[in-house]
Image: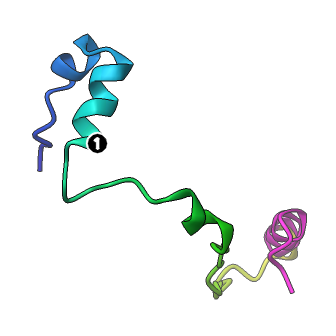
Amino acid sequence: MKGQTDWAKIDAMTEEEIEQNALSDSDNQPLPDEFWNEAEVIFSEVNIILRDESSKFKNHIIAVLSEVDCFL
């Protein structure tokens, strides 16, 4: 499905015009700064099934997940 965004029109607009258009959209008003004071990032739990039993592949996956602190 092709998007309906007119990127040429957006590219021709100034940052101020883009911001004004966004602010005039009553269905998509910006969040107040206070919202972010109590916001927290929540990472969902991910289950990974390793079908390849080779230890080289398994060790690589474990190393990558350990580096990004999502392997428990």
Q: Is residue 61 magenta?
A: yes
Relative to 8, 35 lies left or right: right
Q: Which of 11/23 is in front? A: 23
Q: What colouring style does the render use?
A: rainbow
Report x, y in % for residue 9. Answer: 16, 19
Q: Which of 60/30 is in front? A: 30
Q: In this view, does 68 lie above or below 24?
A: below
Question: Which element type, helix, strand or loop, lies under badge 1?
Answer: helix
* Range of magenta residues: 57-72
* Residue at which label 1 appears: 23
Query: In which quadrant of the rendered image does the C terminus lie?
Result: bottom right
Residue at (20, 42) in percent of width and height = 24
Q: In which quarter of the image is residue 68?
A: bottom right
Residue at (87, 76) in percent of width and height = 55
Q: In this view, does 25 lie above or below 5?
A: below
Report x, y in % for residue 13. Answer: 25, 15
Report x, y in % for residue 10. Answer: 23, 22
Q: Is the magenta stretch mostly helix, strand or loop?
A: helix
Q: In this view, does 2 lie above or below 70?
A: above
Q: Quadrant of residue 38?
A: bottom right
Inspect the image, locate mark 1, and give the three-letter code of the amino acid beneath it. Answer: Leu
